[in-house]
Amino acid sequence: MCLSGRSIKRKNLVILIALIILVILVIISIFYALLNKDEGVKNRGYYYIDEQGNILNLDSMSSLYSNGFKDDGYALCSYIFVKNENTGVYDIGAGIIDTNGKIVGDRVFDSNDIVIGNDTAFPIVVHENGNAVIYGEHFEIIAQVENDDNANVLGSNYGFSEGLGDIVLKFDDKCLGGYVNTNGEWVIEPKYEKCRPFTKDGIAAVQNPESSLWGFIDSNGNELFDEWFYDVSDFSEGFALVQKDEDGKAAYINTKGEYITDFIFDYKDSQHGFSEGLAYVKLYGEKQYGYINEHGDMVIAPQYMSAGKFSCDLAPVGVFGRGDIYIDKNEKEVIDLDIDVLGYAFTKDGYATVYDFDKGKFGIIDTKGEWLFKPQFIDYTGTLDSYSAPKLENGYCLVYLEEGQSIKKAKKR
């Protein structure tokens, strides 16, 4: 059938209109994409991101460094650029921020003067004008420990933990530490060379200034076990690793001071404590890691080149020629990313950091081995330790971003 000239012209007109509409839509799409293009961060440094990859609004803070948010929703930022409204100059200091990225109390301190505890941000200890000042969560002054004629207050090393905060005083010939309550009252007088924070077991490790040996005290200051050691770990889940002599051999004790193992472990490589009922250990003089239970029994035989703590019922272990994988408590291989990675323990949020050795970057996975963020965060410190590695916990993760870098969230398979 032949088409008339009018039909052909009408058809061509329809095609032309369709092409014009298509070109207009393409132009609008390009314009919209350019308008909404993510140009990344303006300044390189540390930023908080959430599970969706959204960057926490830091306002005037362009760079920070911290271990992350605590359970109470606050984070200590020990490296903050803050504009001085009077001089217009940016000062570098430390402060507490909330999950809105706001500096709590609008207070910024010298990064060496502010300390928070292991468990929560508040109360905090700040060294001001030679005194140890204790602040509450609204940045009100709760109490302070002041200098006196006998000793000067040097401040705190760990801040508050389990209701007690360590305070260090400098006497004429030595520095000694003790513990105060939130009222600034001495609960345990300053008489130890070093004081570590109290754990959930209600026990703290302290060092004798005369012998330099380590022992344990309870929250009333009672010295426990009548035995002192060359070195000790902190208690975790009711157990601590102790090294009696300089030879490096170590054993585990419980909160009653009873030995649950002999001195058969390498202290340096076995001191990280119990988690979810198991502790990774390395036998003295050996090269491979295994796991013991609360009775001191070796329930996972030494067979791994490296090991990490159990969390979310999984632990990262190093397998020769394969890098780190994740196993469960029955030694079953649950996650193998098929690349050479260094694995970190899972957080309570259910995410673990992994370091891709080929790319030289950190990524984050979930408990199924799915990528939340593929490797894209650099190791700025070059140390690959737990402090420099990103850690997604309490809803946020601290990452180091280069200028112009954007967050790329992994697509679900």
Image (cartoon, rainbow, N blue to C red):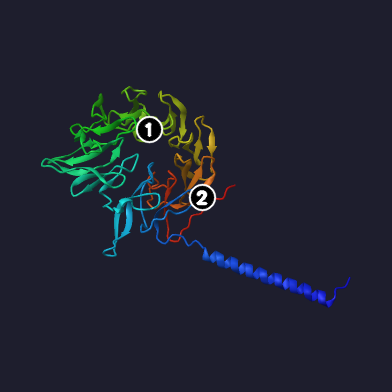
In the rendered structure, the answer to whether residue 298 lies left or right of residue 32 reads: left
| Alpha carbon distance from label 2 to label 1 | 30 Å
Residue 274 position, x and y percent, is 40, 31
Relative to 8, residue 65 above or below:
above
Residue 410 placement (x, y as % from top left): 54, 50
Disc 1 is placed on an element classified as loop
Mark 2 lies on a secondary structure that is strand
| Residue type (three-letter) at the residue carrying disc 2 | Lys
Relative to residue 195, is residue 318 drawn left or right? right
Neighbours of disc 2 within 10 Å: few (<14), some (14-19), many (20+): many
Residue depicted at 16% across the width and 40% down the height: 174
Could you tell me which residue is drawn at 53 percent across and 35 percent down?
333
| Amino acid at dot 1 | Gly
Mark 1: give few (<14), some (14-19) or many (20+) Cα within 10 Å.
many
Q: Is residue 356 left or right of residue 223?
A: right
Q: Which residue is mark 1?
A: 273
First in sequence: mark 2 or mark 1? 1
Q: Nearer the viewer, residue 150 or 124?
A: 124
- How far from the left and from the top, in percent, is residue 262? 35, 23
Residue 249: x and y, percent? 33, 29
Task: Kindly indicate the quadrant of the structure image that contains residue 305.
Answer: top left
* Residue where numbered disc 2 is placed: 374
The residue at the far bottom in this view is: 5
